[in-house]
Image: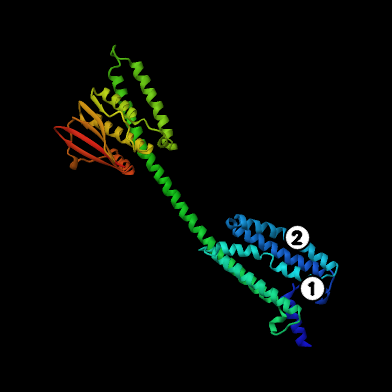
Amino acid sequence: MPDDIYNYSLYFFLNAPDTFFNIEPVLIFESSWYPYVNFAMLLSLMLLYLMFLREVFLETSRRKEVAFIFKYTLISIPLLYVSFAVCVFLQYSNDVIFYTAHLINGPFCALLIYHNWNTKGNLRLVIYGLMVTFVCVVITMLMTIRYNQGLYAHYIDKYPLLYIRIGMFIDILLFQLFLMRHWVSQEKELATQEIKNQLAIAQFKNNVNHALHDDIGTNLSKINLRSYMALQKFYDPGYNVQESLHSIQTEVQTMIEKIKNILSDEQTLKEIPWKEEVYKYAQEMCEFKNINLIFNCPENEPNFLTHHQKYQVVLILKEAINNAVKYSGCTNLQISYMQGVKKITFKISDNGTGFDVPLATFGNGLKNMKTRAANINGEIQIKSDKKTGTQISLTIVS
């Protein structure tokens, strides 16, 4: 008798939920409602597992054939329950329906394994858990068939649901491991993304600083010269002060628009009329210092420069013009460019006092020019002589 109690208790623990209410097992297993509730719980488990797999393998589930199988598996679950309930009510054999319910997710699981077999990383743990569960379900079904046929070749034949519970236990462990690793990976990815965002912000600030110094700085120099000229000739009857002030106002408005373009980075996406921009700037700057401007640029446009490269060329040439007008003391300023097969060279030449290039201390202007040139696959070269003046060349290779 004690052995019977032990075996019966072990069977109840492995094959049925423990109610903890001291209810006799026979009242549960032999009740009229037990088959309906038991099968509903089985199908609910299969449904939840199906939905869980779909969420984990969301990308794979969007494939046409996988979505098709998922759809009809979802439809089959309530149909199976209705068929089972009818068979129980009419006292027909429901073994085939019962065994089919255990394998209802089989086609969907097989497709997931097939499409993700070569997947690397943490998701592979879920694949392993899926395979273990599927194998254990098949073994459980086979052992259940043996049990229902009264085959007890082994001691464990008495507990056919043991295998599915072992499979579920392993699946849960693997999934927990997957969640832990996935969480760690996400934390690393978020940290990496944060660093990338900080670098992008730093780069953006650096670009804005360069643009403000080069483009806006040169325009401020031009406004400064105009203001100086207006003050010097304020009482000159032949000088139109109102026109000069209006020109300063226009230039300030242009600077405001340029600052907007720099901050939005829209200027790099537009077609830059670089020759007109450079010529206009050089003409106005030279006019203030009575410098003769020689603009020797062919009519044809450079055929391989991108919009971004043209924008950078404009800023570099403006900076070179600004330096020549302010510091060289020249009377002639020449701007030209020559295009070869795979390169183009821009030159700014003046006949000023020149300087000793190796001994010169350069400020941010030349540094920014060299940085901009390097970013567009270009190079800055400076030749200067105290007798013949200075020549700055910008060479860009295609």
- Residue 371 versus residue 234: which sits nearer the camera? 371
Would you identify the image quadrant in which residue 364 lies?
A: top left
Which quadrant would the N terminus be assigned to in this image?
Answer: bottom right
Q: In the depicted view, which residue is nearer to us: 335 or 114? A: 114
Give the label on residue 78, or none. Answer: 2
| Horizontal relation, residue 86 to residue 353: left or right | right
Going by the numbered disc 1, the residue's amino acid type is Phe
Confirm whether residue 114 shows in the render.
yes
- Residue mark closest to the camera, 1 vs 2: 2
Q: Position of residue 142 (x, y in %)?
A: 69, 75
Answer above or below: position of 397 versus 107: above
User: Considering the numbered disc 2 on the image, is that residue within a helix, a strand or a loop?
Assistant: helix
Residue drawn 76% across the image and 82% down it: 150
Q: Secondary structure at mark 1?
A: loop
- Mark 1 and 2 residues: CB-CB less than 8 Å, in contact? no
Q: Quadrant of residue 228?
A: top left
Residue 176 appears in the picture as rendered: no
Coordinates of residue 105 in the picture (x, y in percent): 67, 64
Quarter of the image with the C terminus is top left
The spot of residue 256 in percent (x, y) is: 41, 30
Question: Which of the marked residues, 1 or 2, is nearer the chain's N terminus?
Answer: 1
Q: Is residue 88 above or below residue 8?
A: above
Label 1 sits on residue: 21
36 relative position to 214: left or right: right
Q: Position of residue 353 (x, y in %)?
A: 17, 31
* Res 331 quadrant in image: top left
